Structure formats: structure tokens, C-alpha cells
Image (cartoon, rainbow, N blue to C red):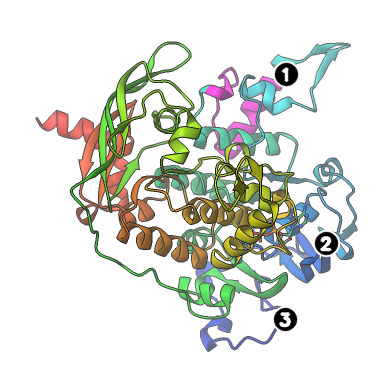
Amino acid sequence: MKGGAGLVSGPAFVFPARLVSPSPASQERHVALSPAIELIGITKRFPGVIANDSVNLTVEEGEIHAICGENGAGKSTLMKILYGMQKADEGVMKVNGQEVSFSSPTEAIAQGIGMVHQHFMLADQMSVIENVILGSEPMKSAGRIDFEGAKARLAEVGAAYGLSVNPDDLVDSLEVGERQRVEIIKVLFRGARILILDEPTAVLVPQEVEELFKNLRELKQDGATILFIDHKLEEVLDISDSITVIRKGKTVATVKASDVTAGDLAELMVGSELPSPTTTEAVVGGDVALEVRNLTVLDEDERPAVNDVSVAVHKGEIVGVAGIEGNGQTELINAIIGIDQPASGQITLLGEDITSASVRHRREAGLGLVPQDRHSEGLLLDAPLWENAALGHQTKAPFAKGIWLDRPGARGRTAEIREEFDVRSPGVDVSARALSGGNQQKLIIGREMSAKPEVLIAAHPTRGIDVGAQADVWNDIRAARANGLATLLFSADLEELIGLSDTIVVMFHGRLVATLDPAEIDPRTLGSYMTGAALAETEGAA
Ligand SMILES: Nc1ncnc2c1ncn2[C@@H]1O[C@H](COP(=O)(O)OP(=O)(O)OP(=O)(O)O)[C@@H](O)[C@H]1O
Ligand SMILES: [Mg+2]
């Protein structure tokens, strides 16, 4: 078969004829003799789960190949096996036709394989160049790192692949898209010709996604092979040559991107039609549930990270906050939930001034939080699910009886959350670490929603959640809104912001610079408000 990406055998699925039709000539690519990657019958078992159940995957040299599938389907596990982070129980791996077996990422790197993880692994307080060479420092002489040589090579790699970074920048000062570029360069610097990216677009705004895709196309031009995981099907169709769909640990199909629609992919992923979000009318009551007035929060350098921000969220209302990461959203969230003290201004929750109340008091008064970073702020990765379900609510029934922790109560509620929010796990006693990324997120959503908050601060609620489950989460938030929940929604997913919000405010350099009607805005225009471009235009015109 031409182009490599043919159908693999697997559970029977009836393909529409056009799925197997020959691709148009414009799609023809140079085809190497042996595929860059061949995984045959890969099986990986965890206690109570078969993460990969005899998975097959063929990736041709020089193609961009996407891996799609529901949360928990086994995508990350398969990529970690290929990168030597985990060991398969069964199966054969071939790289460029040669059978390989990796017992660590170092061995995979030696074979030209590199991986960029979803949770970036850069050291914030180090410079770009220090991060790039970390762990494989080139030496000039004993004890002396060859920084000049490393910088020269970094410039070469950057020029060769059209990726530019400043070697002396502190990683802490970089925006998310730039950090990701550093992660990619780091992998290329080590000589990778096969790149694995696990959900690279989850944290990016549309403009940054375009930039990333441009870079990936250039890498491909240069002959690199790219494997990536993504839940956003339109993106998958836009960038990839071939797509492999995994369902419940098994390969369902490998198709050419040019032969399928997003609907076909979704159907392959879940085996049935996708749930579509139900639209409910907003029932915005007169009462203000959360009010932030003239709030200023200073950063470490005493500069205003949040600058005189005022916003009110009424009962039954969803206010979306749009903004590129690093424009004060984190500081605003932290001030509202009580982690940071504002320099000035006031926060009221259901009419009560909570500006200097404790986190616990705010929680008990009805404030819910879906945090930005599920790993560092939302979960205790090594604790069992039932303890994680109690986090932040451990002082209340059913998690507590008087001053005591109520284990049976907590386990019972966790089982309910698991059922209702479709958290796929072998039980409530496994650690949060054992859940797939999307299922960790669903656990957090379930924990917060089932506590029936009055006000919800939701930061990227569906980040990493598959398209089917995303519709469910939207339904949950809308149903709660119909019952009066006031939500302050932060999201990098602009479709989500526009689709869910009753009002959108734009945060830029610590200020709220625009209030927009979601019914009258599209993602691109919203994106240009977020980068300040639309503002400059308006000012220029005025
Ligand atoms: N270290 C582990 N210990 C136990 N079970 C695990 C571990 N890692 C993954 N699993 C289980 O293996 C299955 C596949 O997980 P994986 O992370 O590969 O899913 P995924 O397809 O990447 O999902 P997502 O889209 O949510 O990231 C899940 O049931 C998960 O709970
Ligand atoms: Mg994953």
C-alpha cells in the first residue's frame, strides 16, 4: 500500500468507501523502505487495567502521525513505551526496521527518539541554554561546561528547523508557547529524528497553535517524523498525514487525514455518535454571587500583576476570562481563592467580604475551584482516589463526621463521583497517578461539582478531556448554572469560552481591557484582543 497509512486489522469497523479510496496525488510523499516506527502487538498491563492490548502502530518516515482516542484509551502509555519510560509486557518494537528494546529514555534518545511531555519539565529558574543542555552538558575541560559551543550548536539547530529562542532568557520569563519551543529544541538538540508530542496544543491559544504547526511542518520538510496526541479533532485533520485511533487499549484504525472528517474520527474513537452539548438559556438572577472590586495584586517585584480589576458574576451566570497565559490570571485566581493577599481592593462572596478570609472559610462558604494545574494544585498524585475526592472538602459530610475523617462516607461519595463523571479507574483505592490525564481532570470536576458550590472558579476545566467527555462537562456546568451556579471561567480553548460564557472579559497585562458578547465574536477576533492587536487598532482608530 502506498503512503503507508493503511487500515490495520482490529475490531471490525465498517468503513465508508471513501476511507479506503486512494489519496489524491498532492498527498504523495517520499516513502522510505521501512517505516520509521513499527509497533507490533504491544501489550501493557497495570493492576486491574490493560492499558495497551496488543496495539499495532506503523509510522512512516517523514510523516506527521496523530494518535487519537478517548481518555484512558492508552495513548500516553504507548508513547511512553516507545520512549523507553515504560516497558511493554509483550510485543515487538522496530525503529527504522531494526528491532529495539529500551529500558530507559536514554536508550530511546540514542536511537533518535525524543519526547515532549504534556506537563513541561523545564527548570524555571535556569536559562534556556542551561535547560537545553541539562543532563548532557558538553564539557570544555574537567568541570567546565562549554556554554559557547552549546550556544553555537543551539543557534544551528534553531536555524535548521526554523525555531528561534534566546539562549540567555530565563525560562520563568517565557510564555507557554516559547517554553514549548524550548522543549522541542531540547529534543532536537539531542539529535532526535522522531519526535513524540503528548497533547502539545492543550495549553496554546490559536495563534500559538498555528506557530507550532508551522514549526512541525518545517521539521517534517526536513525529514523528521512526528507523532503526536491531540483531542482537538479539527487540529488533527489540519496538521497530520495519518491518524491512528485507539479505543480501550486496541488499535481501531489507521486512516489518512485527507480521507476522514472530524465526525468519522469521533465515531472511530467512541464507537458511536458523540453526545452534543445541550444549550440551556442563562437564568442570570439579579443577585451578585462573586464580586471583585478594584483589585490589585502585586508580583514578587512589587509590580501589579492584577491591576485595578473589577468584575461581577451573578447567580446563574458564566463570565469567561480570555487571555494569554501570564497576563495576571493566576494572580487573580489566587487572590479570589485566598492563596495570595491583594495589595488593595475587595472581594465579596454572596455579599460577605472575604478579602482576607482563609482558604478554608471561602471553601466552606461555597467557593469551588478547578485549578489550572491538576498535578501541582489539584491532586495528591500518590494518594488514593477517595482521598483526592475529599481534598478541600474534608471538613464536611460525607467526608467527615464531626472532627473525624469518615472513610466509608468518603469512599462512597468517590464511587458516586466515579460513576456520575465517568472517571475510568479500576476502583476508588488506586492512586491518582494511575489515572490517565483526562480521567484525573474528570475526577477534579466531579469533586468540585458534587460539592454543589455557589461560585465556581474554573480554570481550563476540560483541558486534556476527550471530545465526548468534554460535552458532558459542559452539560454539567450548564445544568449547575440553571440552578444558580455563578462561574468565573478561565480557558485557553476559545471555542469553549465562546460556547459557554454569557459574557467574556479580556485580561491583558493585568487589566480587564474589553468586555465582549460571546454571541458576536469568533475565536480569531477574540485571539486578537488577547494579544493586544485589536486594542491597538481601536486606539489607533480613535
Ligand atoms: N502508572 C500507572 N499505573 C496504573 N495504571 C495506569 C498507569 N498509567 C496509566 N494507567 C492506566 O492505563 C490506562 C491508559 O492510560 P493512558 O494514560 O495511556 O491513557 P490516555 O489515552 O493517554 O488518556 P488521556 O487522553 O486521558 O491522557 C488507563 O486506564 C490508566 O488508568
Ligand atoms: Mg494521555
Q: Residues within 10 Å of mark 1 (few under 14, many from 20)?
A: few
| Of residues 217 and 221, the one drawn nearer to the viewer in this rendering | 217
Residue that appears at 73% across and 53% down = 434
Magenta stretch prevailing secondary structure: helix
Q: Are marks 2 and 3 in contact (CB under 8 Å)?
A: no
Question: Ligand 1 is found in which quarter of the picture?
Answer: bottom right
Residue 436 position within the rendered picture, expressed as x and y whole percent measured from the top left? 67, 56
Disc 2 Cβ-to-ligand 1 distance below 8 Å = yes
SS at mark 1 in the image? helix
Q: Residues within 10 Å of mark 3 (few under 14, many from 20)?
A: few
| 80 shown above or below 4 | above
The numbered mark at residue 10 is: 3
Is 293 displayed left or right of 379 in the figure?
Answer: left
Residue 76 position within the rendered picture, expressed as x and y whole percent measured from the top left? 69, 56
Between discs 1 and 2, the one toward the N terminus? 2
> Which numbered disc, 1 or 2, marks the residue closer to the eye?
2
Q: Quadrant of the C terminus?
A: top left
| Residue 156 highlighted magenta (yes or no) | yes
SS at mark 2 in the image? loop
The numbered mark at residue 47 is: 2
The numbered mark at residue 149 is: 1
Q: Amino acid at mark 2?
A: Pro
| Residue 449 seen anywhere in this rendered image of the structure | yes
Disc 1 Cβ-to-ligand 2 distance below 8 Å = no
Q: CA distance from mark 2 to mark 3?
A: 24 Å
Q: Magenta residues, as a range?
A: 149-172
| Of residues 395 and 451, the one drawn nearer to the viewer in this rendering | 395
